[in-house]
Image (cartoon, helix red, strand yellow):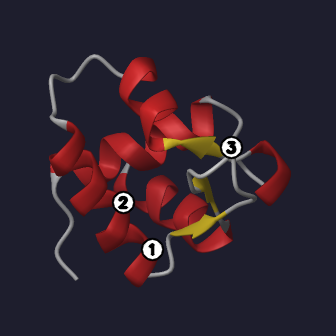
């Protein structure tokens, strides 16, 4: 899997936001508010899907009708490796 800058930024945002467990997971909208990288919702959603498929982030508990996401141990290791 080839990582790009957006993937790295998303892992970093989840880590800095404290989204490290299913109960502390955050929505895509929260991620969008937290970062000021100028990426569209669609770009973020694609990057989140890529990271979920690669098992770097996981789906947390639902927030109403929205999924929430958190960085898991594989994602933390990848973030450390990339930084």
Asked if labels 1 and 2 touch by Cβ distance under 8 angstroms, the answer is: yes
Q: Earlier in the sequence, mark 2 or mark 3?
A: 3
Regarding mark 3 in the picture, which secondary structure is present there? loop
Residue 71 x, y percent position in the rendering: 60, 57
Asked if labels 3 and 2 touch by Cβ distance under 8 angstroms, the answer is: no
Q: Distance between the Cα atoms at labels 3 and 1? A: 14 Å
As displayed, is residue 76 above or below residue 49? above
33 sits left or right of 16 in the view:
left
- Residue of label 1: 52
Q: Distance between the Cα atoms at labels 2 and 1? A: 6 Å
Q: Residues within 10 Å of mark 1 (few under 14, many from 20)?
A: some
Q: Distance between the Cα atoms at labels 2 and 3? A: 14 Å
Residue 32 x, y percent position in the rendering: 36, 28
Q: Residue at x 23, y 40 (%)?
A: 41
Which dot marks residue 19?
3
| The N terminus - image quarter | bottom left
Residue 44 x, y percent position in the rendering: 26, 47
Q: Residue at x 58, y 55 (%)?
A: 69
Regarding mark 1 in the picture, which secondary structure is present there? helix
Which dot marks residue 48?
2
Regarding mark 2 in the picture, which secondary structure is present there? helix
Query: Front-most of 8 and 29?
Result: 29
Q: Residue at x 45, y 74 (%)?
A: 52
4 sits left or right of 13 in the view:
left
Q: Residue at x 18, y 49 (%)?
A: 42
Q: Residues within 10 Å of mark 2 (few under 14, many from 20)?
A: many
Residue 59 x, y percent position in the rendering: 61, 66
Q: Residues within 10 Å of mark 3 (few under 14, many from 20)?
A: many
């Amino acid at each position: 899997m080839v990582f790009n800058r957006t993937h790295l930024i998303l892992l970093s945002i989840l880590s800095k936001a404290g989204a490290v467990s299913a109960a502390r997971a955050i929505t895509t909208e929260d991620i969008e508010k937290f970062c000021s990288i100028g990426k569209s919702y669609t770009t973020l959603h694609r990057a989140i899907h890529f990271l979920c498929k690669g098992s770097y982030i996981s789906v947390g508990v639902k927030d109403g009708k929205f999924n929430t996401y958190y960085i898991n141990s594989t994602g933390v290791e990848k973030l450390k490796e990339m930084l």
